[in-house]
Image: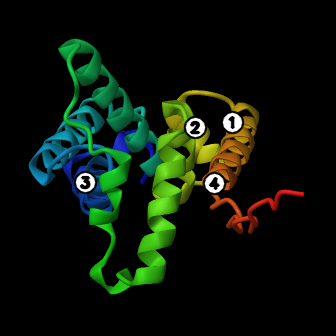
């Protein structure tokens, strides 16, 4: 995006145009409505403008990190149940073209398994899967090293796989046919 000396209104307009939609999508995946997501995106870009000299050239992970911290601050300040989109409702965000019986069953299974994981496991999987970040970029969002993020991702994937296998339908049991005992 250019050296810090060139971080003027033109730079900010290009940043906003390039990344606004991604930040809104990030918010939609975590908040109850589109309006709240748009407000989150606006707050993120206010901070980006104020701290424009700190914004790296690859700005999207940095912006996701700001959004994540803003959400965490909101949730802590309210101390009540947040207006978070439950992971079980995330299929509402899927494009209508992906609707189908097989897809819905698969999505429902993944959502149920994902809901069984901790918030940190869910977040690393969302950053890699939904936001399509690299492990290094996800580490920046989470505020940890790349190695730590890689370990968290590995463990989260392992736990997700375990949760998916726990949901597997047990084999059908065949009734044992019994005959009444004959008296001897």
Disc 1 + disc 2, Cβ < 8 Å: yes
Report the mark closest to the observer, 4 or 1: 4
Choose the circle earlier in sequence order: 4 or 2.
2
Disc 2 + disc 3, Cβ < 8 Å: no
Specify the farthest residue to the right: 184
Report the mark closest to the observer, 3 or 4: 4
Res. 146 visible in picture: yes
The vertical placement of 101 against 92, above or below, is below
Q: Secondary structure at mark 3?
A: helix
Report the mark closest to the observer, 1 or 3: 1
The CA distance from mark 1 to mark 2 is 7 Å
The CA distance from mark 4 to mark 1 is 18 Å
Considering depth in this image, is 174 or 36 the residue closer to the camera? 174
State the mark number for residue 177: none
Considering depth in this image, is 141 or 19 the residue closer to the camera? 141
Q: Quadrant of the C terminus?
A: bottom right
Choose the circle earlier in sequence order: 1 or 2.
2
Q: Residue at x 60, y 53 (%)?
A: 167
Crowd tier of the residue under label 4, counting other residues whose Cα lies within 10 Å: few below 14, some 14–19, many 20 or above? some
- Residue that label 1 marks: 152
Disc 1 + disc 3, Cβ < 8 Å: no
The CA distance from mark 1 to mark 3 is 25 Å
Choose the circle earlier in sequence order: 1 or 3.
3
On screen, residue 130 versus residue 156, left or right, reads: left
- Residue that label 4 marks: 164
- Residue that label 2 marks: 121
- Residue that label 3 marks: 24
Q: Secondary structure at mark 1?
A: helix
Residue 129 placement (x, y as % from top left): 54, 58
Report the mark closest to the observer, 2 or 3: 2
């Amino acid at each position: 995006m250019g050296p810090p000396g060139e971080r003027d209104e033109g730079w900010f307009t290009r940043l906003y145009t390039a990344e606004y939609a991604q930040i809104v999508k990030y918010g939609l995946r975590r908040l109850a409505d589109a309006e709240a997501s748009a407000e989150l995106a606006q707050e993120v870009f206010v901070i980006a403008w104020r701290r424009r000299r700190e914004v790296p050239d690859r700005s999207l992970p940095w912006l996701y990190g700001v959004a994540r911290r803003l959400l965490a601050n909101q949730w802590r300040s309210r101390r009540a149940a947040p207006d978070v989109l439950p992971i079980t409702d995330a299929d509402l965000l899927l494009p209508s073209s992906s609707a189908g019986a097989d897809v819905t069953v698969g999505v429902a299974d993944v959502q149920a398994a994902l809901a069984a994981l901790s918030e940190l496991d869910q977040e690393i999987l969302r950053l890699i899967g939904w936001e399509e970040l690299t492990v290094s970029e996800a580490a920046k969002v989470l505020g940890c090293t790349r190695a730590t993020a890689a370990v968290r991702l590995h463990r989260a994937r392992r736990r997700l796989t375990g949760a998916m296998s726990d949901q597997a339908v047990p084999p059908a049991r065949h009734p044992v046919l019994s005959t009444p005992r004959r008296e001897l």
